[in-house]
Amino acid sequence: MTRLTLITGLIGTVILAALILIALFAQQIAPGDPLQMVGRPLLSPFADPRFPLGTTQLGRDVWAGLVHGARVSLTVSATAAAAVILIGILVGTLSGFLGGYVDDVLMRITEAVQSIPAFLLALALVSVLGASVTSVVVAIALSSWPPSARLVRAEVLRVRTLDYVDAARVAGRSPLAIAFLEVLPGALQPVVALIGITVGEAILVESALAFLGLSDPNLQSWGLMVASGRATLRVAPLLVILPGLAIALASLSVSLAGDALAARLSEGRRA
Amino acid sequence: MLLRFIGNRVWQALPVVLIVAVGVFFLLEMAEGDAVDAYFATTGAGDAGLAAQLREQYGLADSIGTRFLTYMTRLATLDLGYSVAFSRPVTEVIASRLPVTLMLMGTSILVSGSLGVLLGGIASWRRGRPTDAGITVSALVFNAMPGFWLGLLGIILFAVKLRWLPLGGIGTIGADLSGLESLLDTVRHLVLPVMTLAITYLALYVRLMRAAMNEAADSGWALAARARGLPESKIVLRHMARPALLPVVTMLGLKAGAMLGGSVVIETVFAIPGLGRLSYEAVTQRDLPLLAAILLAGTLVVVIVNILIDLFYRKLDPRIADTTG
């Protein structure tokens, strides 16, 4: 691991830890409903000690919105990324281990899904399923699994020719048990490298869907805050700048931490 | 030989397009309500008798199997149905919006790829020095920014504060421009959206180019070229940069779909009347047949861009041109 990766990885991990704490204790840090009108509209930051970052056009506390937005953003993206990787593992393992027709069919489907512009697919899924947190998770999962499936498949293809897998076959274990209990654990390491990228991407997709008004309207999220700040772009640009900064910070910290983790693991493998 | 190559690639792409078409049909089936409900929702009136009659007329009352067959046969003749939101055939609506998006996407791919190659090359050239770290880290930072936000930042800085560039749209409304002036006007309008889209995807290309150039610099062939006394510029351009371009070009193809998806928010932010903004309009007006058709059109664009990129790849890497027909 180079020194640069180490430094950026540390910075990423610290920011990410802070964001997770803020998300966990959102209700303690900024009590109440962040969508409530609590003060005069469009107060600038530091004007009123009760609202350190000012208020929005609708008199909502900006700081409270940012704090509660962390919860939505991190929960949705972590769940969606977990689903993406699970689908990837399932499809990739079956495809790589079974081969033949199953492999052909699954890979054609993977290729097809990968050819659909992912964000368009997510958009269509949310509009069919209705705007809610669950449909956003489902939409991200169903539109972004192909790369992880391909990666897992490639790893499974490599691992399944190793001797210990043959040994398990000779010992008479069932094919599915060999695939998921013997081959898969050996193929998992590169998947770890995917976590950072997948969560970072999911944060961006979630925020873009919320920006377009396709997330739960009863939850304050960063994307939604940017969208409502657009109306007052000329007089209060901070209402757009701050929540966007939060999205970028979250996505960046996750990918920096993920990069460092991946670099560390690949070093461990070489040693 | 070239024609046979293109023919092969189209033949390979057919099952992909077919699977997407089938998937889109079932996606539409998942939605609550059909076109008649959507129609009544827009007109605000209608009775059960009329609804049944309309469903009969448009084949919506048939069984799912029959509807699937009708859908596929109509698709084969490029009949994508009728858009309730725009009161025009879907094909017409899409055809009127596609050129702008193709222009936006094509320029962004070119800008993103060439900037990535340039910056990745510079980073590798200054390997381990502050310039290298600066380029690598800033590319990562831009990659983490949501496109719609970066676009809005560009608007705040360049259109509102500095007044250098227009706020949005693709041409000055009411300005009767011709020839060169009209071209310059379009360029001025496209600078911000293209740069936004290009910069958010830059990191990948910078990273690939940098890694490939580093590898090439350490390789035997660069050393051999140096030993033969070739000028440094020739070594860098012909012996290192050319092979290093290959992974970048592959990635440009893989990311074509992401670029097209990214254009949804970019076109919404900059009020550009393209396919991306159309998909947003289809969602807000609940015009699902239109949305489905956009998915299909988007897939076709991705498939075609990938075939074009494969052609470019063949030009770049003569080893492939020799072996595959």
Image (cartoon, coloured by chain):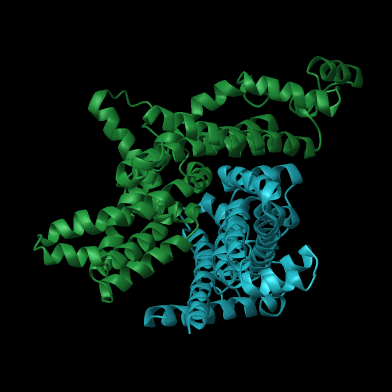
Chain colours: A cyan, B green
Give how far across and how far down residue A124 sits, in percent.
Answer: 66, 42
Kindly indicate the quadrant of the structure image that contains residue A66.
bottom right
Name the residue: 43% across, 82% down: A6
| Most foreground residue, A157 or B136 | A157
Quarter of the image where the N terminus of chain A is located: bottom left
Kindly indicate the quadrant of the structure image that contains residue B109.
top left
Left or right, residue B167 beside residue B185: right
Give how far across and how far down residue A105 sits, in percent.
Answer: 68, 45
Give how far across and how far down residue A131 sits, in percent.
Answer: 72, 49
Kindly indicate the quadrant of the structure image that contains residue A189.
bottom right
| Most foreground residue, B180 or B310 | B310
Residue B273 shows in this picture? no
Name the residue: 67% across, 49% down: A100
Left or right, residue B72 beside residue A239: right
Name the residue: 43% across, 35% down: B102
Left or right, residue B116 beside residue A155: left
| Most foreground residue, A89 or A44 | A89
Name the residue: 60% across, 38% down: B16
| Most foreground residue, A246 or B215 | B215
Left or right, residue B17 beside residue B97: right
Give how far across and how far down residue B40 sits, in percent.
Answer: 79, 25
